[in-house]
């Protein structure tokens, strides 16, 4: 199979100005490319006129909790989205209309889950009540999560499912009650996931990646709290057949739990969040800082001692693994760097989030040995709608939020979504990068695209195959009618590819039927 793509503005991402006009794709790889008219001696089966459109390499989101993301995509959608106009919808009525039109298409017994309800951006400044949810969702079981994780709304049916008396509740859970009920709600919802729903979630996941130009996700999976983890086993089984490239990072600190999966891995990788969290998050006062939190005086420590954490890292480093670790406060970041520095093994280690590193950590990161996976879209939302950073953290800690400085120092900085914590939308993260929390740390659209292409390819150690469009690399790319590099941050938020190609072929669209899933599973298994 060979295709000549011609008459395009192919941004290779080798540098900002490097542009080609044609490329010859054979068996999924870019065989040749050039400028001007295609060379006369080229041999190919078909040719595709790009019609002067812009072409960019596909995007890699290297920090996603894939199975949870698929579950969310199977059961609902994001309540709010960030657009160039601000948060939409931004009224209770607007959210209600979206729920109504979604619910009408679902079976009467369906369970619906919405995340990303940006409470502080909603005019009424409140969560929906059970009566409103009952009306909009036609009596179905529905749960709505606020983006900060501190409030949840449940319909009458959902209250009953999780064992709460609807007569005693308006459906809005907050504070301690909310925290206490979370485990039960998640358990209930996951127990209701059926195979047909999974088929729908997988289809939505594939279509979403195609719509946003994503070709690879780093899948951080595994719930260490259970002895057996059948859900993760299932995720691995499924992911090996996905069109979207999946790179597995199991979140177990015990190497004996990871070994059985080694045979499925393209490269040995481990870590992420879950058991690999060295601290919590600033929004829940659990990120580990030297100084107490401004609002309540809490001092949060790291989850492990240095010795304990060194032990985890050493056990994997000795066996040649790449390691990824969640660390947000400066104490956690320091602990991770200490362990990494002691256990170099030739692999490229990752720090997930790495938000509030101090000057000492910066010096160590600037040596260029580690990849940093950030989510600037979250800080963007926080600054405008949630305001937890300014409420909980001292000014000098907020001032430490850096992006440009890291990139300028040559650190491999990547954008990622941490879905389903945030929507998987890469353009929201790139909005946050080009309009950073601390304005002076904003970067250009070209640099933002680098954080999702060549930097992200390096973070998964596959820069030889992905991350730019060059001869010999995989022909995963998307077309667009806009020049990404000249967009304003607001325009970046609204940017969407026209068509995404994997291996030079247009992405397949999925309907979400069981038959489709069965066919997918019959295809050749890939390494993940
Ligand atoms: Zn995460």
Image (tube, helix red, strand yellow):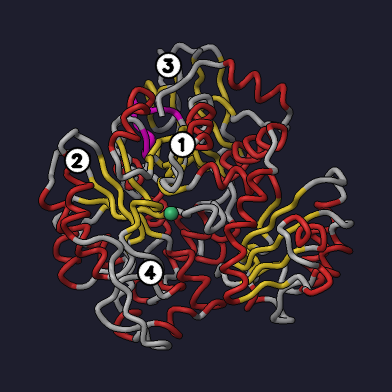
Question: Where is residue 495 drawn, in percent x and y?
Answer: 58, 54
Which mark is nearer the camera, 4 or 3?
4
Query: Residue beneath label 3, please?
Result: 40
Query: Residue beneath label 2, please?
Result: 315
Main secondary structure type of the part rendered in magenta:
loop
Identify the mark nearer the N-term, 4 or 2: 2
Q: Residue at x 86, y 63 (%)?
A: 134
Query: Residue beneath label 1, please?
Result: 228
CA neighbours of label 4 inside 10 A, class few (<14), some (14 to 19), many (20+): many
Identify the mark nearer the N-term, 1 or 3: 3
Question: Where is residue 253 drawn, in percent x and y?
Answer: 30, 45
Which mark is nearer the camera, 4 or 1?
1
Q: Give the extent of the magenta segment.
A: 466-475
Whether the residue under disc 3 has CB within 8 Å of ligand 1: no
Mark 2 and mark 1 in contact (Cβ < 8 Å)? no
Query: Residue beneath label 4, please?
Result: 442
CA neighbours of label 1 inside 10 A, class few (<14), some (14 to 19), many (20+): few
Identify the mark nearer the N-term, 1 or 2: 1
Q: CA distance from mark 4 to mark 2?
A: 38 Å
Q: CA distance from mark 1 to mark 3?
A: 60 Å
Which mark is nearer the camera, 3 or 2?
2
Identify the mark nearer the N-term, 4 or 1: 1
């Amino acid at each position: 199979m060979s295709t000549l793509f011609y008459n395009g503005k192919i941004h290779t991402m080798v540098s900002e100005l490097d542009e080609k006009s044609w490329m010859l794709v054979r068996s999924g790889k870019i065989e040749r490319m050039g400028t001007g008219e295609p060379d006369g001696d080229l041999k190919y089966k078909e040719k595709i006129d790009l019609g002067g459109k812009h072409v960019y390499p596909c995007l890699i989101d290297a920090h996603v909790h894939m199975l949870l993301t698929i579950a969310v995509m199977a059961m609902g959608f994001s309540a709010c989205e960030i657009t160039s106009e601000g948060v939409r919808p931004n009224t209770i009525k607007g959210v209600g209309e979206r729920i109504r039109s979604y619910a009408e298409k679902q079976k009467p017994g369906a369970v619906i889950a919405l995340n990303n309800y940006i409470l502080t951006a909603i005019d009424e400044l409140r969560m929906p009540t059970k009566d409103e949810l009952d009306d909009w969702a036609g009596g179905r079981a529905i749960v709505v999560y606020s983006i900060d994780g501190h409030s949840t709304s449940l319909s009458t049916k959902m209250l009953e499912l999780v064992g709460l008396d609807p007569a005693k509740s308006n459906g809005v859970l907050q504070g301690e009650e909310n925290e206490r009920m979370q485990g039960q709600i998640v358990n209930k919802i996951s127990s209701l996931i059926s195979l047909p729903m999974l088929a729908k979630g997988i289809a939505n996941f594939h279509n979403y990646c195609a719509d946003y130009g994503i070709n690879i996700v780093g899948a951080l999976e595994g719930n260490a709290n259970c002895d057996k983890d059948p859900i993760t086993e299932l995720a691995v089984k499924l992911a090996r057949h996905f069109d979207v490239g999946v790179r597995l990072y199991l979140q177990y600190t015990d190497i004996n739990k990871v070994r059985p999966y080694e045979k499925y891995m393209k490269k040995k990788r481990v870590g992420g969040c879950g058991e690999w969290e060295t601290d919590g998050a600033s929004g829940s006062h659990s990120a580990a800082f030297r100084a107490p939190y401004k609002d309540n005086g809490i001092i949060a420590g790291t989850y492990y001692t240095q010795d304990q954490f060194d032990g985890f890292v050493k056990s994997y480093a000795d066996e040649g693994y790449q390691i990824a670790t969640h660390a947000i406060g400066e104490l956690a970041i320091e602990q991770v760097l200490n362990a990494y520095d002691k256990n170099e093994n030739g692999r490229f280690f990752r720090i997930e989030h790495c938000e509030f590193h101090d000057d000492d950590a910066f010096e160590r990161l600037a040596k260029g040995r580690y990849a940093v996976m950030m989510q600037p879209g979250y800080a963007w939302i926080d600054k405008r709608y949630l305001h937890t950073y300014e409420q909980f953290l001292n000014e000098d800690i907020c001032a430490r939020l850096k992006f440009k400085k890291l990139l300028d120092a040559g650190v491999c900085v990547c954008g990622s979504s941490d879905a389903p914590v945030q929507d998987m939308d890469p353009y929201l993260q790139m909005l946050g990068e080009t309009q950073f929390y601390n304005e002076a740390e904003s970067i250009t659209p070209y640099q933002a695209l680098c954080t999702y292409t060549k930097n992200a390819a390096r973070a998964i150690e596959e820069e030889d195959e992905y991350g730019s469009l060059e001869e010999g690399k995989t022909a995963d790319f998307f077309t667009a009618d806009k020049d990404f590099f000249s967009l304003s941050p607001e325009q970046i938020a609204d940017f969407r590819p026209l068509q995404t190609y994997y291996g030079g072929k247009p992405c397949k669209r999925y309907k979400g039927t069981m038959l489709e899933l069965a066919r997918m599973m019959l295809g050749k298994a890939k390494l993940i």
